[in-house]
Amino acid sequence: MNTAINLFKLAWIQLTRHRVRSLLTVFGVASGMFLFTAVETLQRALAKATQASAADTTLVVYRENRFCPSASRLPEHYVDEIRRIPGVREVIPVQIVVNNCGASLDVITFRGVPDDLLRKFAPEIEIIEGSEQAWRKQDDGALLGEVFAQRRGLHPGDRFDAAGVTVAVSGILRSPFAQDNNVAYVKLPFLQQASRTGLGVVTQFNVRVSGSNQLEPVATMIDELFRSSQQPTATRPEKAFFAETASELIELIGFTRWLGLGAVIAVGALVANALLLVVRGRVKENAVLRTLGFPGRAIGWLVLSEGGMLGFAGGVVGVGMAAAFLRWQSFTMGNEGQTLAIQPDATVIITGVLAALILGIFASLWPAWQAMTQPIVKNLRS
């Protein structure tokens, strides 16, 4: 154990002796891990938004063969008929207005809900600035998600205009769900009038069922109920609805996997190249250590330690910079009214740092093998 610690200290000394080379390698690794972290954040955000779980109990009722919110128009009186279906626990009419239905990095989404049903629609929200009471008193009041407000630099008392809707900021909310942090909640009648869709018309209905096993039967009954009406419906679980309506966004994010793979290969090649140069430059030093009694595996451990430290340092720098940048910019990708918050979490950060450490060690295997198998006499003469 003491020998391993001493070799680890020696590896640190070797790296600090050549500061410029070590720093260049660390910054190279950091660049690759910056890209890797951005890709992992996208992938994880997409997985959260589309992967179903046993806890899912929400259905989205949309106009059949419609995707963009501006094209989906359903009569509000469907609420009473849906509520009578067995297995339905709650029905909430929702009006959605967005500034852009296509794939975009800056989507502004208004959600209009009845003010008395806000807590049933989003029970997890916490008001961190302003107040919900102020929102209820103002016809044009809006509760902004924390990330949305940060991105726009808005605070309670401010006014802003987007997608033809002008609102007054009544409060800032925080939610454990990323989508809630990137939208503006307003009163349903106000948004119906501001968007010129008219009272009595909504974009969708969010239906809460009694259990996840009721999702499919209830969805079938809802669509069957309105099949012959002038506004037929298409009902899907909430995450399946996101996956279908934001298909362009999913394809775009799917392509980023190749960018992440490229970043991993680049990091491994960079560390391996740096350590091969180190091994070749320390031929005499390694031969002297072997002459003094250091076994080959100790020389190999020395090289592996250097690779691990380079990978770990580059990972911490790259992942830290990516996390800080993404939180500062608060990017939101959207498509056809669905938003995806690009916010790194603890899992992404830990995964990135561990990946950099493992890559550093893995890339050191061949240089370590070369250092272990070099002939002592030949190296002393070189």
Image: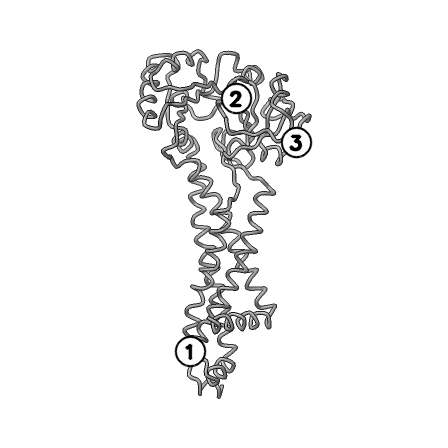
Residue ranking furthest to the right: 157
Residue 153 as seen in the image, left or right of residue 9:
right
Q: Which residue is mark 2?
A: 118
What's the residue type where badge 3 is placed? Answer: Leu
How many labels sit on residues? 3
Residue 331 as seen in the image, left or right of residue 253:
right
Give the alpha-carbon distance from disc 2 to disc 3, as whole Å: 21 Å
Front in this rendered view, residue 34 or 139: 139
Q: Position of residue 174 (x, y in %)?
A: 56, 32
Q: Sort mark 3 into few (<14), some (14-19) or many (20+) by Cα contacts within 10 Å.
A: some
Give the alpha-carbon distance from disc 3 to disc 1, as whole Å: 62 Å
Q: Sort mark 2 into few (<14), some (14-19) or many (20+) by Cα contacts within 10 Å.
A: some
Of mark 2 and mark 3, the one earlier in the sequence is 2
Of mark 2 and mark 1, the one earlier in the sequence is 2
Q: Which residue is mark 3?
A: 154
Q: Is residue 304 above or below residue 105?
A: below
Residue 296, label in figure: 1
What residue lies at 48% left-to-right and 14% top-to-bottom? Answer: 201
Residue ranking furthest to the front: 2
Q: Is residue 49 above or below residue 262?
A: above
Q: Is residue 263 above or below residue 243?
A: below
Which quadrant of the view contains residue 22?
A: bottom right
